[in-house]
Image (cartoon, grey):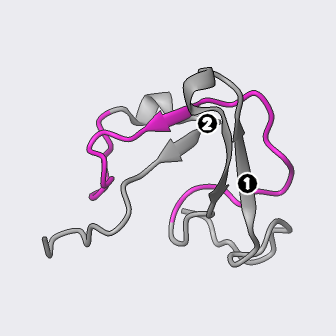
Amino acid sequence: MPSRRGFIGYGINEQLYLEVLNPTDVAYTYKIREARDFGEVLAQPLRNVQLVATEPSEACGQLIDNGNLLLNQVALVERGYVCGLN
């Protein structure tokens, strides 16, 4: 992965929001957080992206089974699981 230094984007502790419009039964504005050790630096607002649940849900390891679906989307990862320790 390329170094994150030198990129201009949102700070690691800056609050970000994801507004879900469809399906309407989960429509809401959710607080989200940029991943600390992987993914892209969010340098501009994302529009019309999909929220994709990772498989496996805790996203441990180098490979995510549905990683091909995550390109230019937002990954939904289960929090609280410590890879290799649970």
Front position in the image: 67 or 52: 52
Above-or-below relation of 33 to 23: below
Point out the residue furthest to the top here.
Answer: 23
Q: Give the amino acid type for the residue marked by disc 2 in the picture.
A: Gln
Q: Residue at x 28, y 58 (%)?
A: 60
- The answer to whether 30 appears left or right of 47 in the picture is left
Front position in the image: 6 or 29: 29
How far apart marks 2 and 1 lie (CA) works out to 14 Å
Q: Which image quadrant is residue 7 in?
A: bottom right
Q: Is residue 55 magenta?
A: yes
- The answer to whether 46 appears left or right of 49 in the picture is right
Q: Which residues are magenta?
A: 38-65
Q: Is residue 26 magenta?
A: no
Q: Residue 29 shows which numbered tag?
A: none
Q: Position of residue 54 (x, y in %)?
A: 38, 41
**Badge 1 is on which residue?**
17
Q: Give the amino acid type for the residue marked by disc 1 in the picture.
A: Tyr
Point out the residue furthest to the front here.
Answer: 25
**Looking at the magenta stretch, what is its main secondary structure?**
loop
Front position in the image: 22 or 38: 22
**Badge 2 is on which residue?**
73
Q: Residue at x 71, y 28 (%)?
A: 21
Above-or-below relation of 54 to 59: above
* Numbered label tally: 2
